[in-house]
Image: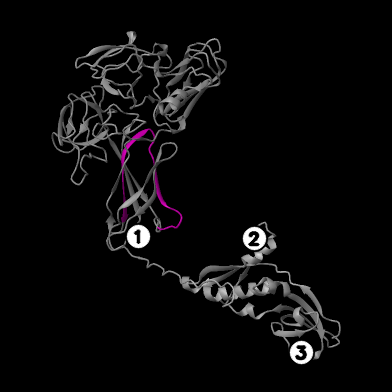
Amino acid sequence: MFRSLQLAPLKPSFNHLTANFADKDFEFVANSVAVYDIDHANLIGGGAGPLFLKSTVNLAGRSSKSQASRIVAVRLREELGGITPDDWKRARQLAFKTTVLALNSEPGMVCSMTHPDMPGGSGEFRVTGWRLNRDYSIDIQGRTTTDSMYDLISGPKPADIVPDQVPEEILIDTGVPGVLSGTPRLGDYGTFAIDDMSVAPDASGNANIVGAHEVTLALYYVDELTTDLWASIDADVDATIDPATVTCAVNPDTARFFRVGDFVVFNEESTDPSNPGRRSYECAQIIGPGNTGGVVPGGDFVLQRAYPGVPEGQATFGTMRCAHLAGTRFYKLDQKTFTFSVRKGFFRTPGLPARIEAKLPSACLVAALAGVANHFGYGPFTVFPLSRHSEPYMPGLRTCNGGAYTFQVPGQLTVQESVVIPMKVQDAASVRCIYAYLQQGTTDGQSAFLVKISRDDGATWEPLEYMGIAQSLPDASKNTYDFLVNNEGYGLPATRRLPYADYGLILAQSVTGSPVPQTIQTASYGANRLGLAAGQFLFLDPGGANEEYVKVITADPDNQTFDAIVTKDHADGERMRPAIWPTPTLNEGDDLAFDILSVASPDSGSDLTLVIQT
């Protein structure tokens, strides 16, 4: 009808189209394909980068990537008006009136339009709207089309992708589960976990975990609240002898017994010359004298250090066979078993690795054993060695308790005894770490503190830990651990699993190595005598070139001297440190307090906080 044609530029609402469909190649699981035109995105981005206008469409009757890709590719080209910038420039939306001669036209049909206003004088369009009016005129709306829109050989085309074959899933168990693997981790408040657990398949490729219903975890540990069952060896032990018969003296103050079959751990912090970077912790099993379960009261112990199949040089639970000094103590390992009932799919849940967790506070874990069971029985048990052979020195992984006792002293520091009202211990626990810090430090001197404990309602006190804040220039130190962290390579309190044991002990004389015992003079801040006790071991120059591990033969705490056999030369002023583990323990009802032994002068520092972690 005359003068009824209206033309307008095409304004695409998207240039990035995603189709959702049920994919028959994956058992009709929901899948999607996306098609976009980067040239159009750059054009409308105006030089600031591509601008994507995104849209989605759900395809109910398509079940393959190929079908869905063809549909969205054509639909995208229709929306843009073609496949080239020239096509986009010529694209139009059109509307016109016609007569009943157009009754045979339908929405979706492609028609031609010849008119001077059409780009190039003529073109094709697809009918998108059709309405019959009361006067029998017909309103038609459409969008221009080009042949290239429907020619998928022209322009970009998604590549057909053949999906990988779905791996065959074995849904039955044909034997016991395979070998278990995982990552041991410490949790909070005395928990231990094995995380990221998986089971290796057997030779046929079957892990046999479809019917896995039980996981067992066995922990071998020293209970840090009862470390009284120990024995010391009377003579040096060579690393190569296995089994080894050693003469031992059992702690006379214990009411418990060693038995044949018990596992033990040697608590020796000295360096292992055969394995650089490791300490001489070693596990073994008592195999005599007598039969399994029989009491070994003292005297000779027969220790099995390694078993068939263990790599050369190793001992029990993944430790190494080491030489041990006379006087070294070994401790009995307790054992506790945890059994976990697990549901079907425990090892087969995507994105949720299998994990087991056990609570055992105030224990020093030396080894963990874990295995999986199905209806055929248990598979092989995996040993997870937990010994720690480098700093911090300890024979195993300490679970600790997770508690803390905090003292706060506001204002300027002054030398005083029992600074605050003693605090009662709530739960029995071993000490994890003790430290103190100031809000305002000093640069003109050092401070020293003694943390102490009373087990008889304050009638008598015994030292728990000495520590100090060293002088530091030009910036003031505020923490008792600053020097140890910055100069000695120790970790921050949050990472520590042992007390700092920073007693300030140093040699007050030079020492010349000798095969005979000699008297050694020591010094410390606060005239500290902690650690100087007969039968204990000391490090001279710990971590240094002259590091030496010596046994205290006799001690004179009042004069701060001890007798020992020292075989290396040591300089006046060298640092000393006593053996750290086993750590002190807190019993329920004990009293905790501390003394300020010295402060800096004239600026003493202020606002002290002291923390005892368990």
Q: Within 10 angstroms of label 3, few (less than 14), some, or many (20 or more) residues?
A: some
Seen from the viewer's position, the closer of residues 588 and 439 is 439
Q: Given contact means CB atoms under 8 Å apart, are the residues at marks 2 and 3 in contact? A: no
Q: What residue do we see at 19% from left, 17% from top? A: 515
Q: Which of marks 1 and 2 is in front?
A: 2
Of the image marks 1 and 2, the number of the one nearer the N terminus: 2
Of the image marks 3 and 1, the number of the one nearer the N terminus: 3
Q: What residue do we see at 27% from left, 33% from top? A: 281
Q: Distance between the residues labelled 3 and 1?
A: 69 Å
Q: What residue do we see at 34% from left, 55% from top? A: 199
Left or right: where 185 falls relative to 322? right
Judging from the image, what secondary structure is the residue with disc 2 in? loop
Residue 129 in percent (x, y) is at 75, 80
Of the image marks 2 and 3, the number of the one nearer the N terminus: 2
> Callout 1, which amino acid?
Gly
Q: Indicate which disc residue 103 carries.
A: 3
Residue receiving disc 1:
211
Q: How far apart are marks 2 and 3 (CA)?
A: 44 Å
Judging from the image, what secondary structure is the residue with disc 3 in? loop
Left or right: where 94 falls relative to 203? right
Q: Which of marks 2 and 3 is in front?
A: 2
Q: What stretch is highlighted in magenta?
A: 348-373
Q: Quadrant of residue 322?
A: top left
> Callout 2, which amino acid?
Pro
Residue receiving disc 2:
50
